[in-house]
């Protein structure tokens, strides 16, 4: 997006973003984002994981620099070069994870970052803190150790730290994620008092209720783009329910620029065919940082695409990994072509034709430093004809790799290029080639178009349709409702690790799925 | 989204240009390795000057005793035998991303077991069979010593750097205890094991004093290099080393491979101990600990875990240690100055790497 066409910054903005774009290898994290931040307003940034919220915060707090576009502070274009610079400009950030030193006292934490050649000015600090806490109606134990405070109290300390440093803009990154309901309420009240004093707040969350309760202005991010904004004037006229339904519409609704929005699957699945992949009562124990799964059951017939919709982080990855055999299931059965495979290893399941295309292309899908050619065969190491008697047959590998490169249109300078040097779309093609090549019977696609550009997105979707057309069973996990609606025969909705409903992809599927996703009955 | 540069069809044409690039790459790497070594020699020379030793005389002695005198070069090549085995063991572990720093404990236990078994075995069976048995015993005992860190790493994710280092202290002490209490030669007053007669030791090469252990060491490191680069097993280990999550995703049995890596690495360290005893020393004295295991680590790093390059660096290390010992005696420099020299090389190398990386970054930007 060109920055010329962006709306001119309002005089009231203390910070404004104009057409800010940030790219990482293979992914556009932020794509032409405009944002205006004003004093006396809580500006809520809403979006799922990977929508680009963290990147945006990184740029505002000086950790990262935009590739395109500009940031205006007080109406003047100002590159924010470092976190220190951001603080000097009056932009204070409270990160998702606490950034306090637990073994020091609150006062010592607040004094960190002062000039090293001076004695810490404790008296001055105490006076300043007393003044701030009085006006905000909170109390902070200055001489308590941080480790003795609750998470909510620690957060107050972090906010206080930003205030002590004369912040005019306070960024709260997923600040409610670790708080109790009461703590969240208190934080909300504190935010209201802070904006009452003329501060600007950017509040990042993915919880719709909080957005509606605490915000003045809401911007919704989706896959790196800003898909909509509710300005304060409109915000005040709407009730909570109306706001939530408007946000749902923005987050999951039709996009004007989606070229496939109108398309409909035209395949017909034979209803009498025996299911190819059958899952019954699959359960996975929750871990520290991932939800578990409970009683997951579904069938997929040959040639059918079953979609799994849901807000990211509701057990999608766990489901995919449990099916592929990477994650231990605590119960339930998985049948492929009628044969039970739940006790088999990852390799044996692949051997039987169950393929898993991971969403973490560089993290686990490939070995970034290895050449493209080897990455095609990462899941077949030792198999003939590429290895004979355990010895690598380089000619055979290169021949087949060249064939796959042609067949799947992988754009690579050479077969020896480390796969991490390719663009995200081409890495995805390598993975597609690896999983769809000979012997596949059922394929799990986990967010197959995540972070891809339009051309590669369309190409990947076509591959998936072709896969189903070949008579394979396809499980398509995606957070992009549009994608599911344009491709699936049926759509199941996952929430908190269980399937809360399955909807046939008919005309009213969009609303039904949307309602299931936010916890309402379809 | 980044723009794709070349269509797949012209991949072959581009391979030719990449070959030129590879040659430039090798030249660049050579420069990046030898340059820092030269700089390190100069810095170490300054240190020598500061303690009142003529650096040229020191380096002269090192080269003369370690490289140019017939006796010196033979000693150097003999010294390489155990170092090559140790380097081979480290290459396996490091390429698989596991930092086995317990080489010294495994080496000493291997050495003690060889010294304990070989003199007994030669009396009951043909010498060649006895030596093979002694090698196997050393290897198995060293492998067993690595089992605990291996299992802890494989199934509990306990950091192997710490566990192997701890096991090396225990192993060194255990080796001492074994020499003093169990395998002590009753015929001597000094605490040491029984001595393997010279005629039963590994044969010397031709008419020199060079041990044929050198050939075994070279074979070991070349085999390890080929296994790591050319076989399915080696590739699996490299996948585990380069991206453990990809290994899980690809369905590799990571715990089993982990235990295998430790066993191979420790087994080679045990063989290093055996080859030093059966080939050269003949017995183990109490409190003997040459600390080869730690000295080899920098050489393997300098070689970037490449077997052939490691042979070169092990040779350099041998020259330095043999030459350094005699230069130290004559010039009154502490014996450990060799280690100082090696560590300066490492630090300068790391700095050069950093500068090179920054330069590349800024050129791209």
Image (spheres, coloured by chain):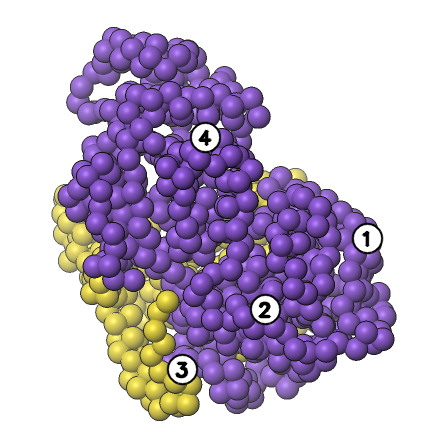
- Using a 10 Å C-alpha cutoff, classify the residue at mark 1 as few (fewer than 14 neighbours), some (14 to 19) or many (20 or more): some
Q: Marks 2 and 1: which is nearer the front?
A: 2
The color chain A is rendered in: purple
**Which SS class for mark 1?**
strand
- Using a 10 Å C-alpha cutoff, classify the residue at mark 2 as few (fewer than 14 neighbours), some (14 to 19) or many (20 or more): some
Q: CA distance from mark 4 to mark 2?
A: 35 Å
Which numbered disc flags the more N-terminal residue, 2 or 1?
1
Badges 1 and 4, same chain: yes
Which numbered disc flags the more N-terminal residue, 1 or 4?
4
**Which SS class for mark 3?**
loop
**Which chain is depicted yellow?**
B
Residue A281, label in figure: 1
* Residue B357 x %, y %: 27, 60
Q: Are the residues at dot 1 and dot 3 in contact (C-beta closer than 8 Å)?
A: no
Which numbered disc flags the more N-terminal residue, 4 or 2?
4
Residue placed under numbered mark 4 in the picture: A214
Which numbered disc flags the more N-terminal residue, 4 or 3?
4
Look at 17% across and 42% down and name the residue there: A75
Q: CA distance from mark 2 to mark 1?
A: 28 Å
Residue placed under numbered mark 2 in the picture: A486
Camera-nearest residue between A1 and A407: A1
Badges 3 and 2, same chain: yes
* Residue B60 x %, y %: 20, 61
Vertical comparison of A313 with B355: above or below: above
* Residue B91 x %, y %: 49, 63
């Amino acid at each position: 997006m060109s920055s010329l066409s962006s709306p001119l910054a309002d005089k009231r903005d203390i910070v404004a973003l104009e057409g800010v774009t940030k790219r990482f290898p293979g992914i556009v994290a932020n794509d032409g984002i405009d944002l205006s931040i004003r004093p006396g307003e809580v500006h809520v940034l809403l979006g799922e994981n990977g929508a680009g919220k963290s990147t945006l915060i990184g740029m505002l707090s000086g950790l990262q620099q935009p590739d395109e576009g500009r940031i205006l502070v007080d109406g003047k274009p100002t590159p924010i070069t470092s976190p220190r610079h951001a603080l000097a400009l009056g932009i204070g950030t409270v990160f998702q994870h606490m950034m306090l030193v637990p073994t020091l006292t609150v006062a010592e934490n607040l004094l960190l970052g002062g000039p090293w050649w001076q004695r810490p000015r404790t008296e001055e600090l105490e006076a300043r803190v007393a003044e701030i806490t009085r006006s905000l109606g909170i109390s902070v134990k200055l001489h308590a150790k941080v480790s003795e405070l609750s998470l909510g109290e620690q957060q107050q300390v972090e906010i206080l730290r930003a205030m002590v440093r004369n912040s005019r803009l306070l960024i709260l990154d997923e600040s409610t994620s670790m708080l109790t309901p009461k703590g969240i309420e208190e934080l909300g009240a504190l935010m209201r008092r802070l904006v009452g004093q003329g501060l600007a707040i950017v509040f990042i969350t993915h919880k719709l209720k909080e957005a509606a309760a605490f915000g003045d202005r809401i911007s919704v991010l989706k896959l790196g783009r800003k898909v909509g904004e509710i300005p304060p004037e409109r915000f005040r006229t709407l009730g909570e329910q109306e706001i939530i339904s408007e946000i749902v519409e923005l987050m999951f609704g039709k996009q004007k620029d989606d070229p496939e929005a109108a398309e409909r699957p035209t395949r017909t699945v034979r209803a009498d065919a025996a299911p190819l992949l059958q899952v019954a009562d699959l359960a996975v124990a929750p871990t520290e940082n991932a939800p578990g799964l409970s009683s997951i059951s579904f069938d997929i017939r040959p040639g059918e695409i079953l979609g799994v919709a849901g807000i990211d982080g509701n057990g999608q990855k766990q489901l995919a990994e449990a099916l592929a055999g990477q994650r231990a299931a605590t119960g339930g059965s998985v049948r492929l072509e009628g044969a039970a495979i739940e006790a088999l290893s990852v390799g044996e399941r692949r051997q039987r034709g169950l393929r898993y295309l991971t969403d973490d292309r560089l993290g686990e899908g490939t070995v970034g430093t290895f050449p493209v050619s080897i990455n095609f065969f990462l899941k077949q190491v030792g198999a003939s004809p590429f290895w004979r008697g355990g010895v690598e047959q380089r000619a055979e590998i290169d021949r087949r790799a060249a064939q796959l490169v042609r067949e799947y249109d992988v754009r690579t300078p050479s077969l020896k290029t480390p796969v991490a040097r390719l663009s995200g779309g081409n890495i995805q093609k390598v993975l597609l080639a690896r999983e769809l090549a000979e012997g596949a019977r059922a394929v799990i696609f986990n967010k197959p178009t995540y972070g891809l550009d339009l051309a590669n997105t369309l190409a990947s979707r076509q591959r998936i349709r072709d896969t189903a057309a070949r008579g394979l069973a396809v499980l398509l996990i995606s957070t992009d409702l549009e994608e599911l609606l344009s491709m699936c025969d049926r759509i199941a909705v996952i929430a908190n690790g269980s399937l809360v409903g399955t909807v046939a992809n008919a005309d009213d599927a969009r609303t039904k799925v949307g309602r299931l996703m936010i916890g309402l009955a379809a | 989204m980044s723009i794709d540069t070349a269509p797949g069809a012209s991949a072959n044409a581009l391979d030719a240009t990449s070959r030129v690039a590879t040659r430039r790459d090798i030249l660049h790497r050579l420069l990046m390795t030898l340059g820092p070594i030269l700089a390190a020699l100069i810095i170490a020379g300054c240190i020598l000057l500061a303690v009142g030793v003529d650096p040229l005389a020191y380096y002269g002695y090192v080269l003369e005793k370690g490289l140019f005198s017939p006796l010196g070069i033979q000693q150097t090549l003999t010294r390489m035998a155990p170092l090559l085995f140790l380097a081979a063991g480290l290459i396996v572990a490091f390429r698989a991303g596991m930092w086995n720093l317990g080489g010294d404990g495994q080496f000493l236990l291997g050495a003690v077991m060889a010294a304990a078994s070989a003199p007994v075995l030669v009396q009951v069976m043909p010498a060649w069979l006895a030596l093979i048995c002694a090698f196997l015993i050393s290897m198995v005992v060293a492998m067993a010593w690595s089992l605990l860190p291996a299992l802890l790493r494989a199934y509990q994710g306990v950091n192997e750097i710490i566990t192997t280092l701890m096991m090396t202290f225990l192993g060194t002490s255990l080796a001492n205890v074994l020499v003093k209490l169990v395998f002590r030669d009753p015929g001597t007053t000094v605490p040491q094991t029984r001595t393997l007669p010279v005629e039963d030791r590994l044969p010397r090469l031709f008419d020199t004093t060079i041990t044929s252990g050198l050939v075994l060491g070279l074979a070991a490191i070349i085999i390890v290099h080929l296994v790591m680069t050319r076989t399915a097993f080696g590739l699996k280990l490299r996948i585990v080393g380069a991206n453990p999550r990809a290994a899980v995703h690809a369905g590799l049995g990571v715990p089993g491979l982990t235990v295998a890596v430790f066993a191979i690495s420790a087994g080679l360290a045990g063989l290093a101990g055996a080859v030093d005893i059966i080939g050269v020393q003949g017995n183990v004295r109490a409190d003997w600990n040459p600390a080869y295991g730690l000295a080899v680590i920098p050489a393997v790093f300098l070689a970037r875990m490449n077997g052939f390059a490691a042979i070169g660096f092990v040779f350099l290390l041998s020259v330095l240690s043999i030459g350094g010992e005699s230069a130290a005696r004559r010039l009154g420099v502490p014996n450990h100055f060799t280690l100082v020299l090696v560590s300066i090389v490492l630090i300068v190398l790391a700095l050069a790497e950093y500068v090179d990386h920054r330069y590349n970054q800024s050129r791209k930007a």
